[in-house]
Every structure is written in structure tokens, then in C-alpha cells.
Amino acid sequence: MKKISNTQYQISNIQSYAPTWNLKFGTWNFENILSFLDQKVNSFNHTSFIETDPIQVPALFTTKENIEIAGFLAATLAWGQRPTIIRNAMRLITLMNNNPIEFLMNTPEDEWDGFADFKHRTFNSTDCLFFLKSLRNIYLNHGGLEQVFTLGFQKDQTIFTALVHFRKVFFELEHEHRTEKHVSDVLKGAAAKRLNMYLRWLVRTDKAGVDFGLWKKIPASALMLPLDVHTGNVARKLGLLTRTQNDWRAVEEITAKLREFDPTDPIKYDFALFGLGVFEGF
């Protein structure tokens, strides 16, 4: 496996951009905001970003299936303090003998006792064991994670239907109702931040080398913004989002705006909005 450094991300290395236009956010015009966001994408979308982000977990691997599985588990745990997210995601990978696909396919369930005390916030061992069973079912009976998301996407060429289909397949095995809260339900209006972030990781590709670009049948142009409190607040300050709730309707609104800036790769601006909120306190 490729080893990822834990070196602290050096914010001081990022050149701060001082806009010269009116600081009343609502008066920034299209060109102003586009220039500002493009500069911030260039600041944050590089390999140093990996060192403080959960994407470092799947970045440990080179095989497609391990990147997919490790990425999905890391994205699932991606709420709370980032060091805790990364530590717990790394623990899951260690419990899977640092080879997720091999573990799921060849380790009997009666040897999964190492997960009995796993916990990340409200995600407990019951949830964890079901996630492993469901992932194994997906690779045994549905062609893998890429196939499931792709089949959903092809229904009407939207990420919305991809997420609906994925959730249906994911919970087709018997499970406790409590576990359902750990996979967002866009049919109920959820923003699905973690799933959209996961799709960004697997679908997007560029020369920066952060996202993997492994899945070729879902275009980057169709991706939706991984909306959270940080990206939402920055988007509102820039006048890109009017909806006050961070829900699916807000995801649709902000993503539509970002497509005006770059129709082929709108979610590259996740780097800008997230970086501005988390690293620069914008």
C-alpha cells in the first residue's frame, strides 16, 4: 500500500486572495465570483489537501475495489472532528486486514468479532456489521459499488436516482431500522453530503491528483455538491444560495449555480467553498 504522510496541512502555504471588489457579497458579479472561486480551487485542489481529509483513507490503495470500499466507509464516518473521522476509518481498514475486498469476500462472518466494539459517534457495531454484510452482498450479487450507482444513474441521468437506487439495494438485506439513518435518504429531502462527497472522489478526475476518477459511466457534469454547514454558509455569503436549509433542494440550487461557472466540472468548486469555510473562516 502507498503510505500517506500525516504531515499537518500548512495553511500558511496557501496564498490568501484579497478581492478588490465590493465586499457586500450580494453585489459581486458573475466574473468576480468566478475569478475568486477559480483561484480558491487552485489553492486547495492539490495533493496537500489529502493529508487532512478522509480521502486519505482510500488513497492508501491502488486496486479499484479497495479504493471503492475504503472510500465508502471513510465517507460514511465523515461527520465530526476530522482527526477522529480519519482515525476511526483507519481502524476499520486495519480490522479488515488492510485489504477490504479480500476481507469481505474470504473472511467468514464468525471471524468478524473484531468489530464488536467499534463505534463512531452514533455509528455502532450493529451498524458496522450490517455495512460489511451489505457491501459483501453488493460485490457478490450486484457487480460492485460502481455498478449499483451507475444503474441508478442511468434511469434518468441524475445523481438523485443514483442515490435512491443505491439506498434501495444497500438495505435489501434484513437489518435494524436504526442503521438506515447512516445512509441519507434523498426521497425525504436529505442533502446526502457524504454520499455526494463519495461520488466526487470516485467520479471526478483532473491533473491535481486528489479525486480518483475511477468511475467512467457517470459524468462529472452530473455530480452534486456535497453540501454541509461550511459550504452552505460560504455559498450564502457569496449570494450563490438563497435557501436557508441544507437539504436536497439547496443542493440542487447551489449545484445549478456552480454549473454556470463550469458546466463540465461544477463540483470542483467544492474545494473552494469547503476550503474557504474550514481553513479560512470565510
Image (cartoon, helix red, strand yellow):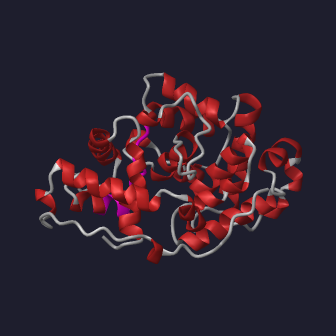
Residue 88 spot, x, y in % from top left = 67, 67
- Taking 28 as reference, is 82 above or below it? below
Q: Where on the picture, by quarter, is residue 39?
A: bottom left
- State yes or no: residue 147 in magenta: no
Observer able to see residue 8: yes
Q: Is 202 in front, or is 33? A: 33
**Residue at the spot x=73%, y=41% of the render?**
65
Location of the N terminus (image quadrant): bottom right
Residue 120 spot, x, y in % from top left = 62, 67
Residue farthest toward the top in the current orientation of the protein: 155
Observer able to see residue 242: no
- Taking 17 as reference, is 214 above or below it? above
**Residue at the spot x=46%, y=44% of the render?**
185
**Residue at the spot x=48%, y=22% of the render?**
155
Compared across the picture, whether 77 is left or right of 241 comes to right
Residue 220 spot, x, y in % from top left = 46, 36
Q: How many tags in the picture? A: 0
Q: Residues in magenta?
A: 223-233
Compared across the picture, whether 190 is left or right of 181 comes to left
